[in-house]
């Protein structure tokens, strides 16, 4: 299959984001209601949760809701509060060289993916990253050079909290330092378990293990796949080869030094690059973030798409993915 990746820039919530939301509205709202609406919080509960945990985001939230029509379902969706399950694959790691470099693969269902790389200037803070639900981010960077990426944490537990893409957006909107990012990840509740790696332009980094049923654990792990300190959901770990990918990356970090180009290249080949599109865990893109340059490379085998925060170009690429039936590129 093919996906059209779009690079979109809009300083404040307006017509471009409203147009994108209109395209995805049916898919977004069907997903939001897919497990039934009885368990989803009301609009008032959603906005109250934002006021409690992310007060700096409420003004942006109100603008976004108004830009897409201000409907009840749309507003509840955009809050990311107590959403349905997100079960992704993904791998991410910090390059062991001197320069700060965070590389990640995003493994997910291509039919449930925005395919939008978005630059915003909301509230005077420049942020670029891979969009999820237009308000959330799967990975990204802000004008302080703070860089962040997520992987699923491999646990079944769910609780009252926010979808992790909005937590990443919030972190990049309000934080400039590693310590500020740690504070956000300790205090904002996540509805499921996720691993969030944060890197700054001085190569300080950490990985936070978020969970709905226990306190956030801050670690110095340079690698994250789809479990936390240990495997707690064995079948999911087997399906996504979480342990095997973690071991492979840890070996890369401890072997003889390799160039950043070679390190990035390992993400474009097995065992990190996944062809499991039939299971919903195919690699949709690789991202290599360079905080010291405020730049990112989005990569696919044989293709590189570069974006810079200071001179962002709005354009689009058509990306072909392997057909899982015969494993060749379409």
Image (tube, helix red, strand yellow):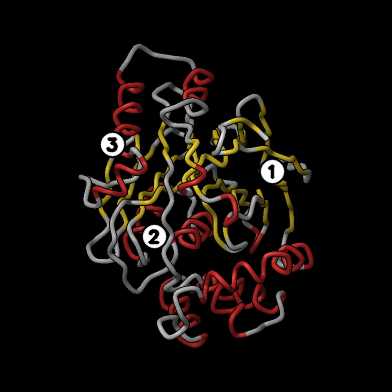
Residue 177 on image: x %, y %: 44, 48
Q: Residue at x 47, y 22 (%)?
A: 263
Does dot 2 land on a helix, a strand or a loop?
Answer: helix
- Tag nearer the camera, 1 or 2: 1
Question: What residue lies at 27% left-to-right and 57% top-to-bottom?
Answer: 216
Q: Answer whether labels 1 and 2 touch (C-beta < 8 Å).
A: no
Q: Nearer the viewer, mark 1 or mark 3?
A: 1
Is the Cβ of the residue at disc 3 closer than 8 Å to that at disc 2?
no
Check disc 3 and report the residue beneath it. Answer: 243
* C-alpha gap between disc 1 and disc 2: 37 Å
Dot 3 falls on a residue whose secondary structure is helix
Instruction: Check the image and report above or below for 249 versus 76.
Output: above
The residue singled out by tag 2 in the image is: 184
Q: Extreme front residue here?
A: 325
**Picture coordinates of residue 152, whole percent (x, y):** 38, 51
**The N terminus is located in which quarter?**
top right
Q: Quadrant of the C terminus?
A: top right
Q: Position of residue 122 (x, y in %)?
A: 65, 62
* Mark closer to the observer (3, 2): 3
Q: Earlier in the sequence, mark 3 or mark 2?
A: 2
Residues 239 and 120: in front is: 239
Give the mark nearest the N terminus, 1 or 3: 1
Q: Nearer the viewer, residue 74 or 221?
A: 74
Q: Quadrant of residue 318?
A: top right
Q: Which mark is residue 2?
A: 1
Q: CA distance from mark 3 to mark 2?
A: 28 Å
Is label 1 in a helix, a strand or a loop? strand
Q: Is residue 31 above or below residue 185?
A: below
Mark 3 surroundings: few (<14), some (14-19) or many (≥20) residues within 10 A: some
């Amino acid at each position: 299959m093919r996906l059209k990746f779009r690079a979109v820039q809009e300083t404040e919530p307006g017509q471009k984001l409203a147009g994108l939301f209109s395209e995805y509205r049916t898919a977004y709202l069907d997903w939001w209601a897919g497990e039934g609406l009885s368990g989803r919080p009301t609009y008032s509960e959603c906005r109250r949760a934002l006021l409690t945990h992310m007060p700096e985001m409420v003004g942006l939230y109100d603008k976004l809701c108004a830009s897409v029509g201000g409907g009840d379902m749309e507003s509840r969706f955009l809050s990311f509060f107590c959403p349905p399950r997100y079960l992704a694959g993904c791998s991410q790691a910090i390059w062991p060289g001197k320069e700060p470099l965070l590389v990640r693969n995003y493994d997910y269902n291509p039919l449930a993916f925005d395919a939008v790389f978005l630059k915003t200037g909301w509230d005077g803070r420049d942020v670029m990253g891979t969009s999820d639900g237009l308000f959330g981010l799967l990975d990204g960077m802000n004008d302080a050079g703070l860089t962040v990426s997520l992987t699923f944490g491999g646990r079944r537990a769910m609780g009252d909290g926010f979808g992790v893409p909005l937590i990443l957006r919030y972190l990049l909107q309000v934080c400039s330092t590693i310590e500020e990012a740690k504070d956000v990840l300790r205090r904002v509740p996540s509805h499921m378990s996720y691993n969030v790696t944060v890197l700054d332009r001085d190569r300080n980094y950490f990985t936070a293990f978020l969970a709905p049923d226990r306190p956030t654990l801050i670690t110095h792990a340079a690698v994250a796949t789809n479990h936390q300190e240990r495997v707690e959901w064995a079948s999911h770990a087997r399906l996504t080869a979480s342990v095997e990918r973690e071991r492979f990356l840890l070996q890369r970090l401890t072997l003889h030094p390799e160039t950043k180009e070679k390190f990035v290249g390992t993400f474009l080949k097995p065992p990190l690059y996944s062809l499991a599109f039939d299971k919903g865990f195919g690699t949709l893109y690789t991202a290599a973030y360079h905080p010291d340059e405020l730049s990112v490379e989005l990569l696919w085998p044989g293709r590189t798409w570069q974006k810079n925060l200071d001179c962002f170009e709005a354009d689009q690429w058509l990306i072909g993915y392997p057909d899982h039936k015969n494993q060749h590129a379409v």
